[in-house]
Amino acid sequence: MSKKIVLTGGGSAGHVTPNLALIPGLSEHGIEVHYIGTAEGIEHTLVHGVPYHVIEAGKMRRYASAKNISDIFKIFKGYGQAKKILRGLRPDLVFAKGGFVSVPVAWAAAKLKIPVILHESDYTPGLANRLCTKKAQKICLSFDTRGAAGGKGILTGSPIRSDLLTGNRAAGLEKLGFSGSKPVLLIMGGSLGAQAINDAVDAGIDELAKRYSIVHLRGKGKLNPALEGNPDYRQFEYVEDGLNDIFAAADLALSRSGANAIFEFLALKLPALLVPLPLSASRGDQILNANYFQKRGYAKVLEQENLTRDTLLEALSDLEAHRQELTLNMAQSTEADGTNNVLNIILESIGVK
Ligand SMILES: CC(=O)N[C@H]1[C@@H](OP(=O)(O)OP(=O)(O)OC[C@H]2O[C@@H](n3ccc(=O)[nH]c3=O)[C@H](O)[C@@H]2O)O[C@H](CO)[C@@H](O)[C@@H]1O
């Protein structure tokens, strides 16, 4: 009988794209793959080609909100729904990539004695993964933070969608309508966009467009109609198909330091200026991600507190000046694409290898 695995994770693309990277390899081994996510989360739009099961998920906020109470009920409802789905599917394993939807699924799996493997993308574990640690047999890690993983951590690296690494520069330039005569600057504010980066770019657009051909992934609902028609500027809310060609066309990146994005830059040897999500809006994981990358000589960092039109222009000049050095450091990195490492751990766990 063929093996069956349930993937879960969502809320933002960073909790989904590593799962997408694993699906082809799992399918190649004849494993039946199912996904559990929410109806309204980005996972629902990004997951294709495998059965998708919907549950409700409550968000666990770091701040006081009336929604916290209604979300507690959603968490319990999601737990019940996950238990029912898992009881029906009887998978050999649940692989949870984090985000709030993964909590009820991992808890329900543990209750039903279905093994759970987690993957942690960030330098410090997110709340969802911390809530699931006790329920997991193993925790795959993008960063070497084994000391903090309670003896369950395995350094695997970050699973990267294979097609992202096989883009074509000429196709990317054509899609974007750029000649390739200026360096192409890819601006990415994480999967949801980053208002602070968008604002600084908008303020400096005249100078930026003199220097670069710019492709800007601004986030849902964050397009700037005033910039339409600028021949050196292309904007998108979110790119699902053809991101590989855009990556291949890019010479430099300006980005948040979400873990998946930065490991993708590393795999592509794309020098990046990172503006981490600040402590005021997060647990500070992106600051640690970014500092780690800067320390290794893979990227440069500009704190959001210091981000203005002028500091941005200056920091991008500095990035360009160090471009070769950063590329060389990334070429020498041993932190390769983690897809096969994670795949092997899953296959061993379910007795396929
Ligand atoms: C605000 C927030 O909580 N952010 C977290 C979230 O980031 P976020 O969801 O932004 O995740 P990442 O930056 O890690 O990854 C974004 C993913 O979306 C893809 N992409 C992005 C834009 C686009 O147009 N098309 C596209 O495919 C990227 O290639 C990448 O695979 O999860 C990360 C991984 O746990 C954390 O490090 C971040 O701190």
Image (spheres, rainbow, N blue to C red):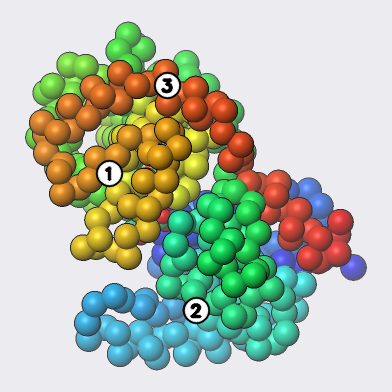
Crowding near the residue tagged with mark 1, few <14, some 14–19, many ≥20 C-alpha atoms within 10 Å? many
Asked which quadrant contains residue 247, the reply is top left
Q: Check the picture and name the quadrant holding the C terminus.
A: bottom right
Residue at (44, 67) in percent of width and height: 126
Q: Nearer the viewer, mark 3 or mark 2?
A: 3
Q: Secondary structure at mark 2?
A: helix
Q: Secondary structure at mark 3?
A: helix
Which residue does the image show at 36% across and 12% down from the upper left?
180
Q: Give the farthest residue toward the right.
A: 1
Label 3 or label 2, whichever comes before in sequence order:
2
Closer to viewer: mark 3 or mark 1: 3
Query: Which numbered tag is attached to residue 348?
Result: none
On screen, 332 above or below 123?
above
- Tag 3 residue: 325
Q: Which mark is residue 275?
A: 1
**Residue at 19% across, 21% down:** 209
Of residues 3 and 330, the one drawn nearer to the viewer in this rendering: 330
Marks 3 and 1, the one that precedes in the sequence: 1
Classify the position of the N terminus by image quarter.
Answer: bottom right
In the image: residue 159, left or right of residue 12: right
Give the distance between the C-alpha atoms of the residues marked 3 and 1, in whole angstroms.
20 Å
Going by the numbered disc 2, the residue's amino acid type is Leu
- Numbered label attached to residue 131: 2
